[in-house]
Image (spheres, helix red, strand yellow):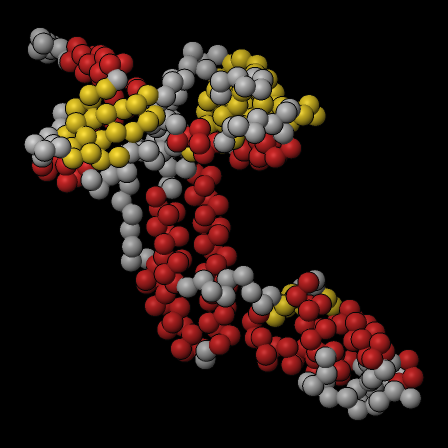
C-alpha cells in the first residue's frame, strides 16, 4: 500500500517538477499528469487527493506545487496567462554576469556602430543579459531596493561613451551572411552575383573560406580551387547567393586568422614583405609605442635615440595610406616597393591640388 502522507516540500518530486519546468512549457493539466506519474513511480501520494489507488493528484496539489516554485524563484517562473502555461528560467548561464561586463558590452556596441549587422546582434545580447540580471535582482531583493539597484546599473552602463569619428556605414543582407556561414561550415561551394567596381553584375562560383571584418567593410574570402590565391568579395556587393550541394576539399594549411595577420589592413597584393619604418621625433616615438600596428611588429631602439618598427606583412597600398596620417614622422625604410608606393601616393596627392586659383563664377 502506498505511503499516504508525503510532504511536498521535502520530496524529491519537487526537484523533478522544477527540472521539467526548466526544459519545457507546461499547463496545469501537464503538471497534474507529471506529478501523478512521479508519485506513482515512488509509490507515494500527497494527502487529501482523489483517486488514491491510481495515484491521481488533485488540483490542490498542483496549486501548492506552483505556489512553492513561485515563492522560491519569483519572476523566474514565467507565466503565460493567455495560453495558461508555466516555464521556469533559472538563468544559470548569466549568473556571473555583472554590470561592469554589460557596460563593456555597451561600449563595444557603440564602437561597432558602423557595422549594422554586428551592432544589431550585440544589442540583442545586451538586452537579454540586462533583462535576466534585472529579474535576478528583483527576485532576490525587495521592490524598493531592487528598483534602486537597477537604476544604479542603468546609470553606470550609460556613463561610458565611445567616440567614433567619420566612418562608412557597413550594411549587408544578413540572409547572405547566414547562407555563407552554412556553406563554410558544410564546405559547400556557392554561386552568387557580384557587383564589381565597374558597377556591372557578374556570375561567380567559389569555395567560401571565411569572413573577414575591417573598419570599412565585411569581406567574403574565397578561392576557385584548392591552393588558389584567396579573393576578397565585399558582402554588400553580393546578391542571389546559393549554397550548392558540391562539397570541396578543405585546405588544412589555410587559416582565416593567419591570412588576416599576413596583411596590413584588408588589401592583399599577394605578397608578404619584411617591413621597416624609422621614427626620429621623440614625441612621435612616444605616440607610436602606444600603437599596435601589426601582430608581428617589433620596436628596435638605436643609439641616436631613433626607433625602427619592423614587421612582416603585405598590403603596401594600405601601409602607404596609413603612413600619411603620421605627417612624415614615420619614414618607410624598406622594402623598395613600399618606398615607391609611398612616393607615388604623395605625388598623386600633390598633383590633385591645383596650382592656379579657381576663377569665380559670374
Q: From the viewer's perspective, tell me whether residue 287 is left or right of residue 54.
A: left
Residue 292 visible within the image: yes
- Quick one: 256 or 154, which is closer to the camera? 256
Which of the 4 quarters of the picture holds residue 7?
Answer: bottom right
Task: Tell me residue 188's x, y (percent).
Answer: 64, 27
Task: Tell me residue 254's x, y (percent).
Answer: 51, 28
The residue shown at (23%, 25%) is 276
Tally of marks: 0
Task: Tell me residue 170's x, y (percent).
Answer: 41, 32
Quadrant that contains the N terminus: bottom right
Task: Tell me residue 362's x, y (percent).
Answer: 11, 10
Which of the 4 quarters of the picture holds residue 65?
Answer: bottom right
The residue shown at (44%, 32%) is 258
Vertical position of residue 123 compared to residue 248: above or below: below
Vertical position of residue 51 compared to residue 79: above or below: below
Q: From the viewer's perspective, tell me whether residue 69 is left or right of residue 215.
A: right
Residue 63 visible within the image: no
The residue shown at (20%, 21%) is 333
The residue shown at (43%, 11%) is 198
Q: From the viewer's perspective, tell me whether residue 310 is left or right of residue 84.
A: left
In the image, farthest residue toward the front: 303
- Quick one: 20 or 288, which is closer to the camera? 288
Vertical position of residue 170 compared to residue 142: above or below: above
Amino acid at each position: 500500500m502506498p505511503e499516504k502522507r508525503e510532504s511536498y516540500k521535502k520530496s524529491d518530486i519537487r526537484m523533478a517538477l522544477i527540472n521539467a519546468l526548466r526544459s519545457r512549457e507546461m499547463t496545469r493539466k501537464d503538471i497534474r499528469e507529471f506529478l501523478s506519474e512521479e508519485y506513482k513511480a515512488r509509490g507515494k501520494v500527497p494527502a487529501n487527493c482523489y483517486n488514491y489507488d491510481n495515484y491521481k493528484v488533485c488540483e490542490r496539489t498542483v496549486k501548492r506545487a506552483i505556489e512553492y516554485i513561485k515563492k522560491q524563484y519569483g519572476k523566474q517562473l514565467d507565466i503565460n496567462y493567455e495560453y495558461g502555461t508555466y516555464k521556469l528560467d533559472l538563468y544559470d548561464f548569466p549568473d556571473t554576469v555583472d554590470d561592469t561586463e554589460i557596460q563593456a558590452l555597451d561600449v563595444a556596441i557603440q564602437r561597432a556602430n558602423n557595422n549594422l549587422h554586428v551592432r544589431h546582434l550585440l544589442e540583442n545580447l545586451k538586452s537579454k543579459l540586462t533583462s535576466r540580471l534585472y529579474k535576478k535582482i528583483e527576485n532576490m531583493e525587495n521592490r524598493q531596493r531592487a528598483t534602486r539597484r537597477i537604476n544604479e546599473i542603468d546609470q553606470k552602463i550609460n556613463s561610458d561613451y565611445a567616440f567614433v569619428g567619420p566612418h562608412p556605414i557597413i550594411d549587408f543582407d544578413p540572409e547572405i551572411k547566414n547562407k555563407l556561414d552554412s556553406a563554410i561550415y558544410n564546405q559547400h561551394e556557392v554561386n552568387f552575383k557580384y557587383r564589381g567596381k565597374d558597377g556591372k553584375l557578374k556570375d561567380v562560383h567559389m569555395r567560401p573560406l571565411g569572413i573577414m571584418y575591417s573598419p570599412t567593410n565585411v569581406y567574403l574570402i574565397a578561392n576557385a580551387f584548392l591552393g588558389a590565391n584567396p579573393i576578397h568579395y565585399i558582402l554588400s556587393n553580393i546578391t542571389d547567393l546559393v549554397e550548392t550541394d558540391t562539397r570541396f576539399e578543405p585546405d588544412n594549411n589555410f587559416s582565416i586568422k593567419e591570412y588576416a595577420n599576413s596583411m596590413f589592413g584588408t588589401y592583399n597584393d599577394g605578397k608578404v614583405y619584411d617591413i621597416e619604418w624609422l621614427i626620429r621625433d621623440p614625441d612621435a616615438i612616444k605616440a607610436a609605442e602606444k600603437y599596435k600596428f601589426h601582430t608581428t611588429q617589433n620596436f628596435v631602439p638605436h643609439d641616436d635615440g631613433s626607433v625602427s618598427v619592423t614587421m612582416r606583412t603585405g598590403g603596401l597600398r594600405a601601409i602607404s595610406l596609413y603612413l600619411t596620417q603620421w605627417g612624415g614622422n614615420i619614414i618607410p625604410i624598406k622594402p623598395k616597393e613600399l618606398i615607391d608606393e609611398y612616393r607615388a601616393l604623395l605625388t598623386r596627392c600633390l598633383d590633385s591640388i591645383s596650382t592656379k586659383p579657381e576663377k569665380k563664377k559670374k
